[in-house]
Image (cartoon, helix red, strand yellow):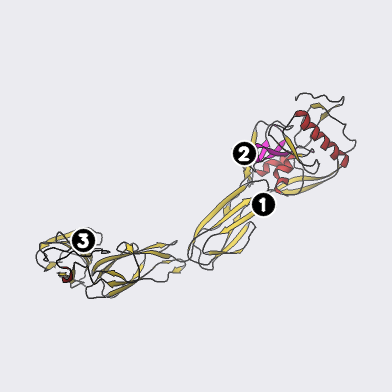
């Protein structure tokens, strides 16, 4: 029982029916209530939750004498209790606390919702979900009383006191028991495929918040797609226009102050090849290399992208790795060109090209394998670039990282043979600049021949093929 406040001799028991029944609240009031019904007419209606579940509600029309009375009573009630409560809407029978908190506050029409209909908002399709925080825009259910409110900035709440005005007030500065509060927030989702989207292919994204007239839907298309339809609605359609990673984002804002954001990420179009490398360095057209072993690499992005497919000139020994190409540049060639592609469910990329030229200085020595492909033996010939004898080789941008032999001769060469899994299968030691290596113990396949004299290292691919 609240303290009795005696201002005049008239005392009544005020019953707030339907929303926030304040039982046996005995207090003095400035004027008696009007005679006759407190509403003009009533009409049962059906309203809907944000996820389109039906709610039974009622519309009422006002009687002016009663509205005047409720206004005065609300002012008196706030003043006499010393509450921090500011009137923000007129007294009316058109909507109650539940109608305001769950419906009217979202810019929906006035209506009166009974307490026994409220659970439809957080059960069934779950338009709302219970949360532990009281951030702005949350609904509040007074579990120990028949009342609802919404959170507002600066620690205040907003609620309609039955037929009295709408107030912004501190949570316990109202005629309701403010212990045992439950908070609820809107519970949207965003659906739509995140599979590969091809050029001109269309795709729709949806949210399950389909019946909330005051909500705004802000869609954000990412790169490589464009909007087809649905801006500002709960369904948004896009189509693919390019190649690359993309996204569709949705932000929902409600008049009560709630905001929600989600994003779907996916890949649009064919794969993209980028980050071209030569021996680990950035590629440019005409990049110079010494004769010998080198490797090319690309970065491939794209859903379902295949390993890079390489176009290699005829007669070049090579090995394909994961988005890499290991090849041997012959001494007799002045330039060489390659191209790379990748394929996914949307098609094959256009060619990514490499054009490499022979470096005419700073190549310390070289090695030839003959024949290649070979069957029973291979002849290894060490060749030295006479233009750098007596000096230090320019090894800038050279994959082999060789150092010129100060004596100008090559002796005691160590030869190692690795298979395509980089496992050592044979090793030898030979002297001189030309020598034969037997291959009878090797199966058909691709091998790497490595020769070193202690200062220089040279590698080249060998193909063993007997049929």
Marks 3 and 1 in Cβ contact (< 8 Å): no
Q: Nearer the viewer, mark 3 or mark 1?
A: 1
Q: Nearer the viewer, residue 188 or 32?
A: 32
Q: Residue furthest front?
A: 391
Q: Is residue 403 left or right of residue 56?
A: left
- The span shown in magenta is 138-163
Q: Is residue 252 above or below residue 464?
A: above
On the question of residue 177 being in view, the answer is: yes
- The quarter holding residue 279 reads bottom left
- The quarter holding residue 326 reads bottom left
Q: Residue furthest right?
A: 35
Number of other residues with Cα within 10 Å of mark 3, as a class: few under 14, some 14 to 19, many 20 or more = some
In the structure shown, which secondary structural element does the residue marked by tag 1 occupy?
Answer: loop
**Residue depicted at x 22% and y 58%:** 423
- Residue highlighted by disc 2: 134
- Residue highlighted by disc 3: 418
**Residue depicted at x 32% and y 73%:** 337
Coordinates of residue 255 in the picture (x, y in percent): 68, 48
């Amino acid at each position: 029982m609240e303290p009795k406040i005696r201002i005049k001799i008239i005392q009544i028991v005020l019953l707030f029916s339907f929303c926030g029944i304040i039982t046996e609240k005995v207090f003095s009031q400035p004027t008696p209530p009007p005679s006759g019904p407190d509403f003009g007419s009533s009409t049962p209606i059906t309203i809907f939750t944000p996820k389109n579940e039906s709610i039974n509600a009622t519309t009422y029309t006002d009687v002016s004498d009663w509205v005047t009375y409720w206004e005065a009573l609300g002012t008196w009630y706030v003043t006499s209790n010393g509450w921090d409560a500011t009137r923000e809407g007129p007294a009316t029978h058109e909507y109650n606390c539940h109608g305001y908190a769950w419906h009217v506050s979202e810019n929906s029409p006035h209506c009166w919702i009974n307490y026994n209909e409220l659970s439809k908002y957080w059960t069934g399709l779950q338009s709302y979900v219970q949360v532990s925080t009281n951030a702005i825009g949350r609904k509040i259910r007074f579990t120990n009383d028949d009342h609802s409110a919404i959170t507002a900035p600066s620690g205040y709440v907003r609620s309609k006191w039955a037929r009295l005005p709408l107030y912004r007030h501190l949570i316990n500065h109202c005629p309701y028991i403010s212990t045992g509060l439950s908070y609820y927030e809107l519970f949207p989702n965003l659906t739509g495929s995140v599979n590969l989207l091809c050029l001109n292919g269309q795709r729709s994204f949806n949210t399950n918040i389909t019946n909330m007239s005051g909500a705004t839907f802000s869609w954000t298309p990412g790169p490589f797609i464009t909007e087809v339809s649905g801006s500002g609605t709960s369904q948004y359609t896009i189509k693919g226009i390019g190649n690359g990673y993309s996204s569709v984002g949705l932000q929902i804002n409600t008049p009560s102050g709630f905001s929600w954001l989600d994003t779907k990420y996916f890949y649009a179009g064919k794969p993209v090849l980028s980050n071209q490398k030569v021996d680990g360095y950035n590629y440019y057209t005409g990049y110079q290399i010494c004769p010998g072993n080198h490797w090319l690499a690309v970065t491939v992005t794209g859903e379902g992208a295949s390993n890079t497919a390489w176009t290699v000139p005829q007669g070049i020994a090579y090995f394909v790795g994961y988005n890499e190409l290991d090849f041997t540049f012959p001494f007799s060639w002045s330039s060489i060109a390659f191209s790379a592609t990748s394929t996914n469910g949307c098609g094959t990329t256009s060619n990514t090209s490499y054009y490499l030229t022979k470096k005419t200085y700073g190549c310390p020595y070289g090695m030839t394998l003959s024949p290649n492909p070979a069957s029973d033996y291979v002849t290894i010939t060490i060749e030295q670039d006479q233009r750098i004898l007596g000096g230090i080789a320019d090894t800038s941008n050279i994959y082999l990282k060789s150092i010129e032999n100060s004596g100008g001769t090559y002796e005691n060469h160590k030869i190692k043979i690795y298979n395509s899994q980089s496992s050592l299968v044979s090793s030898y030691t030979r002297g001189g600049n030309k020598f034969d290596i037997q291959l009878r113990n090797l199966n058909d396949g691709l091998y790497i021949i490595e020769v070193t004299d202690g200062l220089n290292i040279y590698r080249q691919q060998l193909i063993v093929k007997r049929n």
